[in-house]
Image: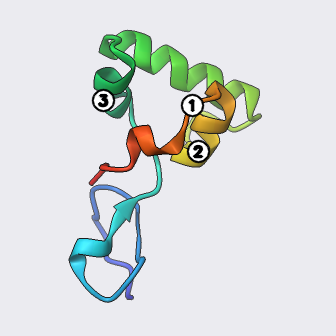
Amino acid sequence: MPIRVGMQSPLICCGTTNHDMSRVCIYPKDLCKPLRIGTRQAQRKLREARKALKKEKHHYITVKEFCEYMGLPEKLFKDLK
C-alpha cells in the first residue's frame, strides 16, 4: 500500500479492503468516551504514558502501548477509525 502524504491518521493495512483498516496510534479524543474522562484529562493520561515509555513529545503512542501501560484490554479501543 503506498503511503499518502497528508493522511490524517496513521493506518495499518490488515487486509485488502478499506473495511479492514484500523488506526494504530491513539489520540486524546479516543480516550474520552471509554474512560469517561474529559479531553484535558485524556491529554494528561497520554502525556503520562509517553513519559513512562520514554518517548519524545512528537512521538505517537500506539493503542497497544497505551493499553499495556494503563492495564486496559485493547478491545476497549477496537472500533477506532
Q: Which mark is residue 7?
A: none
The answer to whether residue 27 is left or right of residue 70 is left
In this rendering, the label closer to the viewer, 1 or 3 = 1
Q: Quadrant of the N terminus?
A: bottom left
Specify the amino acid type for callout 3: Lys
Q: Is residue 62 in view?
A: no
At numbered mark 2, what does the secondary structure look like: helix, strand or loop?
Answer: loop
The alpha-carbon separation of the residues under discs 1 and 3 comes to: 17 Å
Circle nearer the N terminus (1, 2): 2
The alpha-carbon separation of the residues under discs 1 and 2 comes to: 21 Å
Where residue 2 appears, as percent x and y from the top left, is 38, 87
Q: Which residue is mark 1?
A: 72
Q: Which residue is mark 2?
A: 59
Q: Which residue is mark 3?
A: 29
Where residue 56 appears, as percent x and y from the top left, is 67, 37
- Residue sitting nearer the eye, 79 or 1: 79
Q: In which image quadrant can residue 61 be found?
A: top right
